[in-house]
Image (cartoon, grey):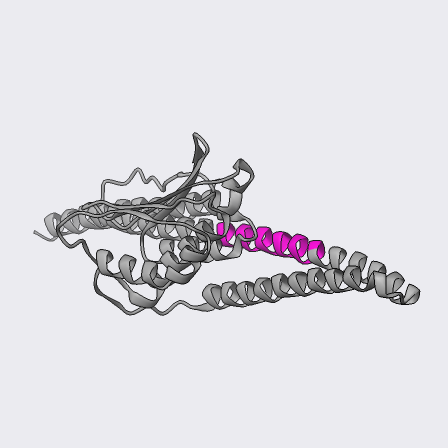
Amino acid sequence: MIYFLCVIFTVIIFILCVRICLFQKSLKEINQGLTEILEHNFDTNALLTVSSGNRQIRILATQLNRQLATLRKEHLRYENGDRELKEAITNVSHDLRTPLTAMCGYLDLLQKELVNNTAADAPKALRYLEIIRNRTEAMRQLSAELFRYSVALSENEHQPVVLSLNKVLEECLISFCSELEQRGITPVINMPEETVFRTLDAFSLTRVFNNIISNAVKYSDGDLHMTLTSEGVVTFANKADQSLSHELDGSTGLGLSIAKLLTERMGGTIDAEYKNGELYITVQFP
């Protein structure tokens, strides 16, 4: 009887030793896999693999793979945000340099006119002063846009509520009535009869639409077409020079960069395309 019990205990101990060895092997595989992925293959979609058939080990590997996927996503978002910030700073530097250079040039011309100090030169001096004033206003607006962009980068809190895209779009357009009239633009609007509801941050959505409409008013050749579909797709189209097709990442720029940032934070997408002489900006909230 004692011999029989010893055999049973020996078998049990052997089985436990085998399981412990397999468990240690699985942990070693997980450790080596994590090291390989984090040090060499982090930017790929490589996953942890284990040879163990143990259910708990496989569950652990699955959970770690999910965390790796989340970590890769956050890492990519950080890299994209860093690149966009660098591009924005480059564009701002260029746009600040342009009016400053012009202002310095006209100040030199104004100085020469004042040195001559003749009545005939007064109109030229006044014209130079007007140009300098306009350039100064452009810089003021650019500084304001840069401030709004920096605020948008630092804002992370949103308060989503159920909104009517139809209503928000109409209210934003009404706020530009004066500017549209001054530019001689009669907007063409197409909306579905039914109300398109989405759960979004009201302030952010208004800023997105306002920035896009403002850009269109500034650079339109006299037209503006807006379309809202029942699927939550909003398209802004206007005739524009091809050089403006990059503005979603450019300087005037900053307003559209803010629109892009806020749209993506709300789970939407925004794209710009230049086609057949028209600039199309499409915003979609699934």
Q: Is residue 187 visible?
A: yes
Q: Nearer the viewer, residue 286 or 139?
A: 139
Residue furthest front as drawn: 119
Q: Position of residue 226 (x, y in %)?
A: 31, 47
Tell me where the magenta segment starts and ends, as one range. 78-98
Q: Position of residue 216 (x, y in %)?
A: 44, 50
Membership of 84 in magenta stretch: yes
Residue 130 appears left or right of 209: right
Tally the numbered discs: 0
Residue furthest top as drawn: 276
Q: Nearer the viewer, residue 247 or 89?
A: 247
Q: Residue at x 49, y 52 (%)?
A: 218
Residue 197 appears left or right of 74: left
Residue 79, above or below 239 = below
Residue 196 appears left or right of 218: left
Q: Residue at x 44, y 45 (%)?
A: 222
Q: Main secondary structure of the magenta part?
A: helix
Q: Is residue 39 visible?
A: no
Q: Nearer the viewer, residue 88 or 169?
A: 169
